[in-house]
Amino acid sequence: MNNYFKKLKIGYLLPFSVLVYFIFSPDTLFAASVDAGEKLVDKKCVPCHRFSGEAKSRFTLKAPDLMWGGNKYKISWLTDFLQGKEKLLYLKNYRWDQTRKPKKHLVLSKDDAQSIAKYFTKSLIDPRVKKEALDLSRFTQMEGTLGEQIFKEHSCGACHQINDGEKLVGGQQSTSFVNAGKRYNVDWVYRFNSHPPDFAPHSGEFVADVSQEGLRFVTGYIMTLGVDDFKFYEPWEDIFFKSARADRGKQIYKEYCSQCHGATGKGDGPAASDLKPNPAIHANMALNKEPEDYLYNVVYYGGKAVGKSPYMPYWGLTLKPQGVADVIAYMKKTFKGPSLEVKSEQAANGSSQPGLCPQLRKTSQAPGDIHKLKNPLEPSKRNIKKGKLYFTQKAKPLACKHCHGLKGDGKGSKSFNMVPPPRNFTCAATMKDITDGQMFWIIKNGSPNTEMQAYNTTKDKSIWQMILYIRQLAQ
């Protein structure tokens, strides 16, 4: 009898458990939430936004079109925005022809916001937006820097405000890009950037004349805005470098590099006679001591990308990552510093003696208004500490210590190959006559006829912080 009742109970419980699972399973709950979201959209959003049809000019709309909203916004950001936790995107109002004052957006409960966000991701999908169009997991810091340059060169900042370090810069005419990386899906940004009028015709949107690579760079840069923990791809840590072979690199050097740098790296290739500045003399350089990331950036992205000669092409698209890794392996194996003969000659004429004090050297002077500038930052412990961090580690394309030395005495690992040698920042006799403005101008623009490259992508505040740190070295 007891077994009978046990079976009977199981018989009743099984259908009930199936029913409970059906009602409360994740898929069922999600579908219910999507349905609720669609009803909320019809009731609360449709009065202002369009959710179907072709793109139209903003001058015929009340608010932005959202028929592709599921591609466009990250669900976490959208949920917060609908709850009033995020700032408005149009700081001068979407219809700036009607009013320059931004209109408040309706605020919803957490449950309603989540339902609408789920409806967006399920139903508002544009087939023109291709998935995985840009792989951010392989986006390098140098590409972010190049993307920032494109953003500035093509006047994107005239309409889009961005967070540039600790301050906001740019215009407010169009969508704010402050913290854009937390808001948008990368595939949407990539497709929109390829031809903005496809989504906002006759609305003042700008079509930039950039290459496919440039489109990738600027899109990736936008996706880093506001993302403090963005993890940049480091190719020199990838399989390409782990499997690099100097013998393959030797052939690549012969086919591509020797035309400028010469067959043995003496800077005497057939193209060298036409170039000013002259190609680097690899035979006199300790490339085995160069940071691998720096060598990668020079070869892959070209001289201009790292503040060196614009005649050095960007070989990445030609050689591909494996080819770049192979030729770097060859150069590091082959070029390990100047020969004894070269060292003797340099020592004899004093042309390459790092650390001299004082240094007799004439450097181009900054324009008058810049030359007279005083450092606008206080020499606080925090600012000096930040300056030291850039000097020793973070400055790009190459940390200052590699040339000027960890102590700033002009005896860095690269200094013994440089003519003239780097500045000795510990020499008070030299430093007392160099103004803050002069230092700022040289760091920003580089110094002609020397190895000092331009740090023109470095934030002004970071340069001033480095100058504060450098000043301490001569005290």
Image: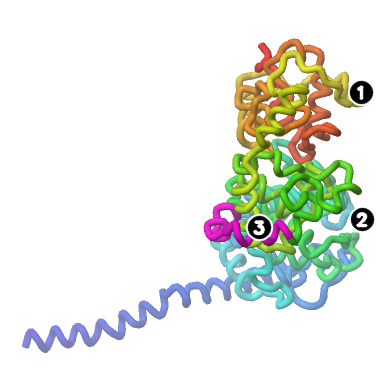
Extreme front residue here?
A: 341
Q: Which mark is residue 369?
A: 1
Q: Give the mark nearest the N terminus, 3 or 2.
A: 2
**Residue type marked 1:** Asp
SS of the residue under disc 1: helix
**Residue type marked 2:** Asp
Q: Which mark is residue 97?
A: 2
- Magenta span covers which residues? 235-254
Q: Which mark is residue 250?
A: 3
Q: Name the residue located 68 percent from the left edge and 61 percent from the top edge.
A: 251
**Residue type marked 3:** Lys
Q: Name the residue located 83 percent from the left edge and 23 percent from the top edge.
A: 438
Residue 237 lies in magenta, yes or no? Answer: yes
Extreme left residue here?
A: 1
Colour scheme in use = rainbow
SS of the residue under disc 2: loop
Q: Give the mark nearest the N terminus, 1 or 3.
A: 3
Measured Cα–Cα span from mark 3 to mark 2: 62 Å
Residue 186 visible within the image: no
Residue nearest the observer in this picture, 66 or 115: 66
Q: Quadrant of the C terminus?
A: top right
